[in-house]
Image (cartoon, rainbow, N blue to C red):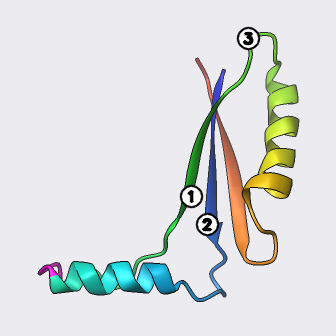
């Protein structure tokens, strides 16, 4: 089973890296880009004997406690049906 965990900066938190990317894109001629928010993406493989319910529980814990900073970031888990 595979899963994806997406981590992004909360909407209320400034994103200086996203702003820099936006300015760079505008400077390269992509004037239609109004804003950019950056984040992190993790693709995780789980062992075959892991149930979907176990995977959701484990990945939620990992997303909350390891992959994101709860003060400034949100995360979401996506289980891929394979």
- Residue at the spot 79% in from the left edge and 24% down from the top edge: 52
Tell me whether the residue at label 2 lies in contact with that at label 3, contact meaning CB atoms closer than 8 angstroms: no
- Residue at the spot 11% in from the left edge and 81% down from the top edge: 29
Element on which disc 3 rests: loop
- 19 relative to 71, above or below: below
**Quadrant where the C terminus is found in the figure:** top right
Give the class, few, some or many, for how many residues have Cα within 10 Å of label 2's Cα (few <14, many ≥20): some
**Residue 73 is inside the magenta segment:** no
Q: How many marks?
A: 3
- Say which residue label 3 marks: 48
- Residue at the spot 59% in from the left edge and 45% down from the top edge: 42
> Label 1 to label 3, Cα distance in Å?
25 Å
- Say which residue label 2 marks: 8
Q: Earlier in the sequence, mark 1 or mark 3?
A: 1
Q: Which quadrant holds residue 44?
A: top right
Element on which disc 1 rests: strand
Q: Earlier in the sequence, mark 2 or mark 3?
A: 2
In the image, 70: left or right of 5?
A: right
Would you say the magenta stretch is mainly helix, strand or loop? loop
- 79 relative to 25, above or below: above
- Residue at the spot 80% in from the left edge and 30% down from the top edge: 55
Tell me whether the residue at label 2 lies in contact with that at label 1, contact meaning CB atoms closer than 8 angstroms: yes
- 61 relative to 39, above or below: above
| Residue 70: x %, y % from top left | 81, 69
**Residue 30 is inside the magenta segment:** yes
- Say which residue label 1 marks: 40
Residue extent of the magenta highlight:
28-32
- 4 relative to 67, above or below: above
> Label 2 to label 1, Cα distance in Å?
6 Å
| Residue 74: x %, y % from top left | 71, 66
**Quadrant where the N terminus is found in the figure:** top right
């Amino acid at each position: 089973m595979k899963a994806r965990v997406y981590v992004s900066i909360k909407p209320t938190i400034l994103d200086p890296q996203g702003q820099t990317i936006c300015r760079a894109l505008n400077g390269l001629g992509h004037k239609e880009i109004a804003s950019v928010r950056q984040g992190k993406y993790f693709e995780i493989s789980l062992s075959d004997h892991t149930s979907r319910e176990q995977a959701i529980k484990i990945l939620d814990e990992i997303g909350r406690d390891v992959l994101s900073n709860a003060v400034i970031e949100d995360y979401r888990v996506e289980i891929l049906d394979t």
